[in-house]
Image (tube, rainbow, N blue to C red):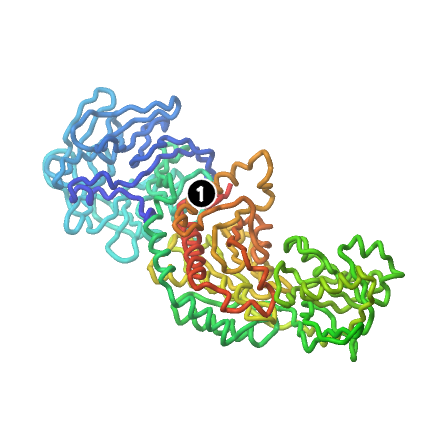
Amino acid sequence: MNTRLVILPLIVFAAAGAAFAQVPSTDVFVFPVDGTELGKAQRVTDREGYDNQPRFLPGGRELVYSSQRDGQTDIYRHDLRSGSTVRVAETTESEYSPTPIPGTTSVSTVRDYGDLKQQLWSVDLKSGKETLLLPDVNPVGYHAWVDDGAVLLFVLGEPHTLQVATIGPGPGKVLAESPGRGLARIPGSNRMSYVDKGEDTWWLTAIDPSTGDMERLIATPEGREDYAWAKDGSVWIGDDSRLLRWSPGQDDGWQAIADLDAEGVYGITRVTFSSDGKRLAVVGARPPADLAQAYRDEAGRIVGAALTDVEGWDKLTYLATVIGHRLSGSAALEEAIDWAVETMGSEGLEVRKQAVQVPHWVRGKESLTVVAPRERELNILGLGDSVGTPAGGITAPIVVVGSFEELEALGRAKVEGKIVVYAVEWEGYGATVQFRTHGASRAAALGAVAALTRSATGHSLDTPHTGALRYDEAQPKIPAAALTPEDSAWMRQMSEMGREVVLRLEMDAKMHDDAESFNVIAEIAGSERPEEVVVMGGHYDSWDAGQGVHDDGAACIAAWQALRLIDQLGLRPRRTLRVVLWTNEENGLRGGREYHAALTDEQIAGHVAAIEMDSGVERPIGFGFGVSGVDTDAEERDPAYERALAKLRQIGALLDGLDAGHIRRGGGGADIGPLMRSGVPGLGVRTVGEHYFDWHHSDADTLDKVDPQNLRRAIALLGVMGYVLADMPERLIPVE
């Protein structure tokens, strides 16, 4: 959706036979001004359609503006006190650019007859008398009064020219070529100003209309030609939703003084002050009523490219097959990082590495043997960050519990010197994983020598699933490993039958000094607001089992490829769209924390949204949306959250063709957690989740478990959501 240049090129419409149906939809706002402080906006217009070119009448309590209605543009007069609006003149032709004539009760307008006949007229606001002011100057585009008898003009032609003319018959005098439409009188001076567009860099230029002498003042922000002189001699100009200010004689350039996003103002074009400097009128683009409608074309291109993409699958195949699993501190993870950086760079993406110190835990050899009642080997995976066993291992009888309450009820006398086995029922990941996380320290507190926990999965083919544990520093550190559900169930059954089981656990696990790793950061810089960022990605590290595909290599490839396709399609969002492949999520979360820690408060505030995919690459169905401090289940709804949710659901409608457009209340992710706790809105990708925990953290997490078309759907999902959030006119949640 190209809403960024929300201007009315009068010349284009005239030359094209007044194609008024395509005039951008804009509104007029008025702000009280005190120095550089703006008060609450007063909305002059609030409708679909073109309302533009405001000018204050003397006294600053009324203004005139151009408004297109029913295919014709006319001049309207608005009273800021009463809120009343009336049409100024009944003409059959369209009129533009209303401008008060100094020392009179009249305003001048450009009357458009079609076929490039555009002449300057005046209308007396008291009597209604209409007068042709310059019968021999045509076609006039824009104008500003030098005094009550002379006017500075933008005259259409090849090239367009800047002219000065005296009211009455006769031609104008050409002063310059290639002017912009912004013409104004410089306060306290006999000089006028215009924007010189004769070169790639546009210059705000002062000109003496009597002599033609010129002086370049300052280059305007890229693509900006509408400005206003304040009473103190400074110049104000719009830049998307921001107002910038420059004071002559100062060398600090344009300085941002206000962001009107929270007022619903973006795509600012024209700005103008009242004569006393106490009010500022601003023209902003009207936000699309329906983001799905506004972005249908772009979304269609992204989805089409994603669903026919083969490059993403090739990347995932290489990552899984050639590099494999990628535990923090391992050579494989660093190989994967270097490969991603090199490949992204070759694709033309802006890419960099961000250093992160990560834990370096090495599993080493490990085994679990049933010593009694009869010897046999069992499959295990040591838990991440576990300590190892002494040389020769630990041989001890087991004590089986189904909950922490059962463990506590046994007491030290029945636990001390034994291996605690958490043979718990599968009640979903959240309920079961707590025994993996805290089980070792809870057992150690009662004198256990090791802990074994049922793998956090509901289905198994004798496959153990690893994951991180968390030691309580107040308790001894004992070795811990994950059992298969089958072996966990056998031990529970033996315990219930009163039969003793003796195990020998051997683990060479060791925690080394921290190692250097890196976040991989790639982005498409925003075309208008590069300092505002939508970040999306997944964690690039994995456990040292399987190939780390569903958790979380495929998500990283999906985010990367979404960015790649957006770049290939030539789509340049107004904000920066960034992809981060976070390191060390599995046993430290240091990648996400370092990304956050490296940002200033201003940069964190610039993050418009954070998107994380970390639930496998089964068929995606949508997103969960969360905001820190907002209870999404509360009976009393948060208004800002509800407005943002409505926007997201409009974007989600663009993914309905993939059955992936559902936006659920509540969501986020581990790596974006630090950003979310700082107030950044967060989205987590959701999938059908039918088999994710069958493979999660195990040797079964391999490429063959991925449907290539689901990877393509994920690329489409991230591409559409990321692009629209980065390009939509307003922030997802405006900054107050």
Pick the front one: 546 or 369: 369
Residue that protrudes farthest toward the right in the picture: 413
User: Is 474 placed left or right of 176 in the picture?
Assistant: right
Q: Residue at x 85, y 57 (%)?
A: 410
Looking at the rendered structure, the number of numbered marks drawn on it comes to 1
Looking at the rendering, which quadrant does residue 88 occupy?
top left
User: Is 119 placed left or right of 398 in the picture?
Assistant: left
Where's residue 19, x and y in %?
20, 41
- Residue 253: in sight, yes or no? no
Q: Residue at x 37, y 35 (%)?
A: 281
Q: Residue at x 74, y 63 (%)?
A: 471
Q: Secondary structure at mark 1?
A: helix
Pick the front one: 35 or 321: 321
Residue that protrudes farthest toward the bottom in the picture: 392
- Residue 181: in sight, yes or no? yes
Pick the front one: 470 or 158: 470
Looking at the rendering, which quadrant does residue 708 occupy?
bottom left
Residue that protrudes farthest toward the top in the picture: 127
User: Is 242 placed left or right of 73 in the picture?
Assistant: right
Residue that protrudes farthest toward the front in the picture: 497
Where's residue 473, x and y in %?
78, 62
Looking at the rendering, which quadrant does residue 541 occupy?
bottom right
Q: Vertically, is 374 above or below 196?
A: below
Please, what is the three-letter code of the amino acid marked with disc 1?
Lys
Where's residue 188, x and y in %?
34, 39
Q: Vertically, is 712 above or below 652?
A: below
Q: What residue is pinned by disc 1?
A: 647
Q: Residues within 10 Å of mark 1 (few under 14, many from 20)?
A: some
Pick the front one: 602 or 216: 602
Where's residue 64, x and y in %?
30, 30
